[in-house]
Amino acid sequence: MIQILAFYLFAIMVVLSAALTITARNPVHSVLWLILAFFNAAGLMLLVGAEFIAMLLLIVYVGAVAVLFLFVVMMLDIDFSELRAGFAKYAVLGLLLAIVMAAEIVIAGQAWTAGPIQLASRIAPAPADVPNIEALGALLYTRYLFAFEGAGLVLLVAMIGAIVLTHRARGGVRKQNIGAQNRRRPQDATRMTKPAVGQGVEL
């Protein structure tokens, strides 16, 4: 009984927070509702026994992606009223894409169970006495090792590309000269003056 109540609690909170993520006028509030949706989705994953996916939602999505969104939204001066102005213009196209993606998901679900191969044979066997995370790790580092290493290589290339783009040479940018700053004497940096009353300081 408690599992059913927990499922409906997490499911309702996921749907509500996802709807509030889209409809919130303040972008900071949207990111906060998105974080709440991730937390409740992690709770749903725990209910079905997928502890690894639940930890991924908390560590990767909440701890990195959502926080990054929050910092970007708070630090950048973005005119969100101008961005919302084109919402009605592309609403029909967005609805059409949503219908197409929903149809693809339904077709994929039907194709998964269709055919002579039964559903039980498609699921990777896992011993009952082995934890979910341990079984997933053993599968990743044995059967899918090359795909796992390829994904890591793609992420490494993306990280190197971001660093190169950040540190590329740009004209008209003043760089910090640490040696010149260390060689500077206090008497070169300050000037003692005694202005008269009402005269002020000359810059």
Image: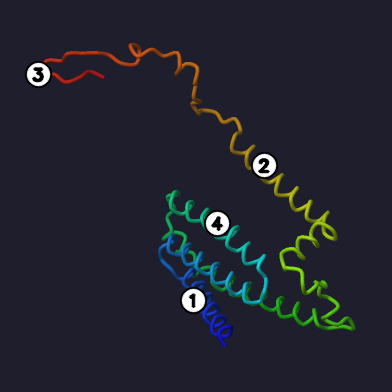
Q: Is residue 47 shown above or below 66?
A: below
Alpha carbon separation for disc pair 3 and 1 = 67 Å
Most extreme residue toward the bottom is 1
Q: For the residue marked with disc 3, what is the amino acid? A: Val
Q: Earlier in the sequence, mark 2 or mark 4?
A: 4
Q: Is residue 53 shown above or below 78?
A: below
Alpha carbon separation for disc pair 2 and 4 = 23 Å
Alpha carbon separation for disc pair 3 and 4 = 58 Å
Under circle 2, the secondary element is helix
Depth order, front residue of 172/2: 2
Mark 3–mark 4 contact, CB under 8 Å? no
Q: Residue at x 81, y 75 (%)?
A: 123
Q: Residue at x 87, y 83 (%)?
A: 115
Q: Which residue is mark 3?
A: 197
Q: Earlier in the sequence, mark 3 or mark 2?
A: 2
Residue 79, horizontal then vertical, whole percent: 42, 55
Residue 93, horizontal then vertical, whole percent: 59, 71
Under circle 3, the secondary element is loop
Mark 1 vs mark 4: in front? 4
Q: For the residue marked with disc 2, what is the amino acid? A: Gly
- Res 63 label: 4
Mark 2 vs mark 4: in front? 4
Depth order, front residue of 149/161: 149
Q: Which residue is mark 1?
A: 16
Q: Which residue is mark 2?
A: 161
Q: Earlier in the sequence, mark 1 or mark 4?
A: 1
Under circle 4, the secondary element is helix
